[in-house]
Image (spheres, helix red, strand yellow):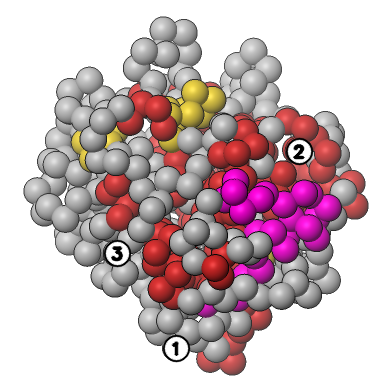
Amino acid sequence: MASHVHRHGAEVRGAQLAPDSPFFEGRFGRMFQHLPRFRPSEKSLRDVAGHMFEPKTGNLARFENPDVPAGYTYLGQFIDHDITFDPASSLQRRDDPDALINFRTPRYDLDSLYGRGPGDDPFMYDQDPADARLQGAAFLIGRDVGNGRDLPRNQQDRALIGDPRNDENLIVSQLQSTTLRFHNKVAAHVAGESGLRGGDLFAEAQKNVRWMYQWVVVNDFLRRMVGDQAVDAIMPAGASSQTIISNLDFFHWQDQPFIPVEFSVAAYRFGHSMVRFDYQINDVIPIVPIFSDSTNPLVNLNGFRKLPQDWGFDWRFFFQMGTGTASRMQHAHRIDSKLAAPLKQLPRTVAMHPRSLAERNLLRGRAFGLPSGQAVASHMGVPPLSDADLGIASVSSEFAGNAPLWFYVLKEAEKKNAGRKLGPVGGRIVAEVLLGLLAGDPQSFPSIQPGWHPKPPFSKQGKFRMPELVRFAIS
């Protein structure tokens, strides 16, 4: 999703990154093992990237997606950080996904939130809470900025969280802060209902939070991005993990799920096109660009810094929080082949060369030898988009009949669904992986209690989505 494009260039081989524990790390792999690799020239890819940006001025409202509030762009980034972390692959080298370690469990277990838990990462947990029942079972929360809460930070303003990437822009850092608060509220509720304390309280609260988060991934985020029909075809109501796995046509594994590079390097990066040029975060602060090179903390949403005073997020600008919020709520941009102008020059704190996010994504797909979009579509039995629909064969003859998979997924959404949701190829890859990871987790709710669903006081009128999660967290 939104950019996680730093930390490239180190040596990477599987033998040098042997996992400490099979339960903490997973591997990357390929979904389409036998399709030919598509490696157009770097120059051709850079030429395509140069055409993939929205204008800086003018009527940018035409790029907005009326079906998707702006917060889901960064929920997608939060989900990505929960299931994947590749700190070592390179843009310049042909990478072998079988030699890469995924330094995140390929599960929705919120290890980006919990780290290794209170025993191994005690610095993240409150040992002297105002509510004594929550000692060691609740997170430390950051400073009050007047209208919100920052992440907990050390004296150098580095966030004390399970995954540093969740501080890379202020929107995802505020999502992390809100989720920390949600856990604490759930822990307080569980303590009051059950009388549990200490490690038992933490384990029960954590299970509840994980399952509700999994519910949001499937029934709020994924349904918005691929549509109800695509989700229900794989995971009908009340489905067990075995049922989900039997409905997967392309995502298969032997011992435990992995992260397909067709997903992580291409299809799931659809969220990059959803990023807006700028955002309004509350009623106090003027509209702010998502990124810039300025070191002035009041002129962009760059991350890895403390939250300025009065910069607490009013989530009514990011999610449909209830009646009367439509005029406040911003929308994500459409899933299409255009990215917001600030992503053409990422901040130097995020990326050096190349600084264009489109160029980085296309070169990364080449380095991993991803198949072309047309090859994947044909393999799926989906009629491929024509060269005229894709519009890049005129850039280079290398793109006649073949397009980079990431570009193809974006263009497919644009042509098939007016950018409101993913098309049949991109949607199937994303749905199969997100639902397959859920089914492959022996601790997920479909594995343990397939008919489970969130109940009051968490759900409202039978619904539990991001608005309900946020409202419970900050109430």
Answer left or right for 335 relative to 47.
right
Q: Earlier in the sequence, mark 2 or mark 3?
A: 2
**Residue assigned mark 2:** 230
Of marks 1 and 3, the one in the foreground: 3
User: Which quarter shows the C terminus?
Assistant: top left
Can residue 466 be seen here? The reply is yes
**Magenta segment, which residues?**
367-390
Answer left or right for 136 relative to 159.
right
Element on which disc 3 rests: loop
Q: Amino acid at mark 2?
A: Ala
Asked if residue 156 is positioned above or below residue 132 in the image, the reply reads below
Q: Indicate the position of residue 17 as horizontal and vertical percent values.
A: 54, 86
Residue sitting nearer the eye, 95 or 456: 95
Element on which disc 1 rests: loop
**Residue assigned mark 1:** 11
Q: Earlier in the sequence, mark 1 or mark 2?
A: 1
Residue sitting nearer the eye, 161 or 242: 242
Give the quarter of the image for residue 421: top right
Q: Residue placed at 29% from the left, 41% from the top?
A: 55
Asked if residue 136 is positioned above or below residue 232 in the image, the reply reads below
Q: Amino acid at mark 3?
A: Arg
Q: Residue placed at 87% from the left, 49% from the top?
A: 247
